[in-house]
Amino acid sequence: MKKAFLLNLFVVVSLALVTSGTSIGQGRSKGITGTWNFKAPEAPYEYSEGSIIIEKKEDSYKFVMAFDEYTKLEAYDVKVKDKEITCKLNIQGDVINIKATNKKNNLEGIATYSEGSVAFTATREKKKK
């Protein structure tokens, strides 16, 4: 009887810990995952706005930048730590290093490439009703 009680208690506590995770992609808030609308005013026109889609698949993250309906680029070397995401994109043969931080449901970031760096901001896309 005592073993059954302890086993049930262990299961309940374990489930509570798993479902109340506080890492960037878990817990009550959505963290960094989701669709974000970004603006980079100092970037070349064709790369100055669009969407960022961040998904968590098992133990890894997927990061896609969509500049229009035809131009979607998937990042590689995606890393998430706390409220920060880093990754790399190839645009026209140039490696773009991206670093963004989730600050109060907005992303603030910088894209660094061979000719310098460009700051960008992004807001979470609201779900359509």
Image: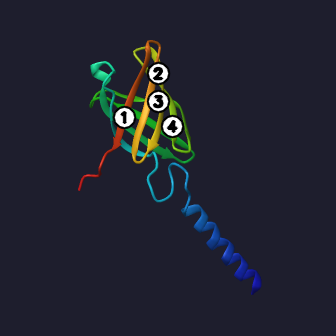
Asked if the residue at tag 1 contacts the one at tag 2, i.e. Cβ–Cβ closer than 8 Å, the answer is no
Q: Amino acid at mark 3?
A: Ala
The mark that comes first in sequence, 3 or 1, is: 3
Residue type (three-letter) at the residue carrying disc 4: Ile
- N-terminal of the pair, mark 4 or mark 3, is 3
- The residue closer to the viewer here, 61 or 44, is 44
Front disc: 4 or 3: 4
Q: How is the image coloured?
A: rainbow
Choose the circle earlier in sequence order: 2 or 1: 2
The residue mark sitting in front, 2 or 3, is 2
Q: Could you tell me which quadrant the N terminus lies in? A: bottom right
Residue 3 in picture, x, y percent from top left: 76, 81
Q: Is residue 39 left or right of residue 116?
A: left
Q: Residue at x 65, y 71 (%)?
A: 11
Across and down, in percent, residue 60 comes to 55, 42
- Count of residue discs: 4
**Residue wearing tag 4:** 85
Labelled pair 3, 1 in contact (Cβ < 8 Å): no
Q: Which residue is mark 1?
A: 121
Q: Residue at x 44, y 46 (%)?
A: 33
Q: Which residue is mark 3?
A: 75
Residue 56, compared with residue 1, is above or below; it is above
129 on left or right of 19: left
Q: Mark 4, mark 1: which one is toward the viewer?
A: 1
Q: Earlier in the sequence, mark 2 or mark 3?
A: 3
**Residue, x 46% and y 59% (percent of image)?**
28
Return the residue at label 2: 112
Q: Determine crowd level at label 4: few under 14, some 14-19, many 20+ residues with C-alpha closer than 10 A.
A: many
- Three-letter amino acid code at disc 2? Thr
